[in-house]
Image (cartoon, helix red, strand yellow):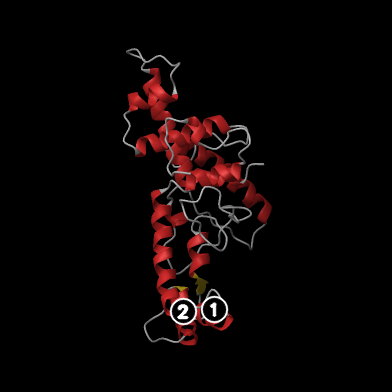
Amino acid sequence: MQFPPDWKNPRAYPDPRSTQPKEFAWEFLRRNPKYQESYREFVRRYNALLNNYPKAQTNRRAGYALVHDRRFQVYEPPILPNESESAWIRRVRSASMTPINWWYARLWDIREWPSDPDEDRPDIVWERWPGMVKILSPHKPDEYLAGRSGKIGLGFDLALPVAPQIEAAQRYLKDHKKWLRAQPDPAIPAVEPRPNRGPKLVILLRALDGKARKASIKEMGAVLFPKSPNEYPGRLRDHKVQQALKAARAMRDAGYRDLLMSR
């Protein structure tokens, strides 16, 4: 199937009645320009390694050599040139070493291997509870500490009772989420995704693809919301397109994780 599909043709999109939330999550993520670039970067690094180990996918010894090549690992914090792994651990103390496929996949709450954005229904293994809890690393900047993409970091004192701290954190997170959704360009979806929201999710996908094809607001409105009036001063149809684009970008950039938790 062509990707992205013809945004004017609803039949070119997943069936809103039978498509599962996790499949919709992939449809939004694959449209994320940052994910697309992340995948291309992973492929460049992985293919460069395969050039040195051409038999790695069919020969066990070559595969073993590939995964033990230092270039196959992401060292956090970075390892110095010509520094041994044991010396690196002694120097940084708190460290992590992750195979590149896992590292790139985890950026998007995928397990083990990132998928090609051009694939319609890849066999993705998602993290079980995406974005639920993350231990913040002490040795690198983190988007949770920076408060980006709807993420936020909270601190807990394990010397104190845990239950009241979780209760207080829950109240704070609910208030903060409400505040984020009230912003002009929210980083999270305006409405919690639910499994029965298939038709609206398809509209959001079509809005993203129409925008990518440089369709105008009026053209998109005439196709996506033909029954809505667009007379001055209300311009209801134009307003619906703008709201759809805002919600679609939020789903593409972070809200797809909520779909992963839908049942």
Q: Tell me how many marks there are.
A: 2
The spot of residue 48 in percent (x, y) is 40, 73
Give me the residue at 68% from left, 52% from top.
Answer: 163
Dot 1 or dot 2, earlier in sequence:
2
Judging depth in this view, the residue of 99 and 187 nearest the camera is 99
Q: Residues within 10 Å of mark 2 (few under 14, many from 20)?
A: some
Q: Residue under circle 2?
A: 53
Q: Amino acid at mark 1?
A: Gly
Q: Is residue 146 left or right of residue 127?
A: left
Q: Amino acid at mark 2?
A: Tyr
Q: Is residue 37 left or right of residue 20?
A: left
Q: Residue under circle 1?
A: 63
Vertical arrangement, residue 238 with respect to residue 185, above or below: above
The label number, if any, that marks residue 107 in the structure image: none
What quarter of the picture does the C terminus occupy?
A: top right
Are discs 1 and 2 less than 8 Å apart at CB?
yes
**C-alpha distance separating marks 1 and 2:** 8 Å
Residue 216 shows in this picture:
yes
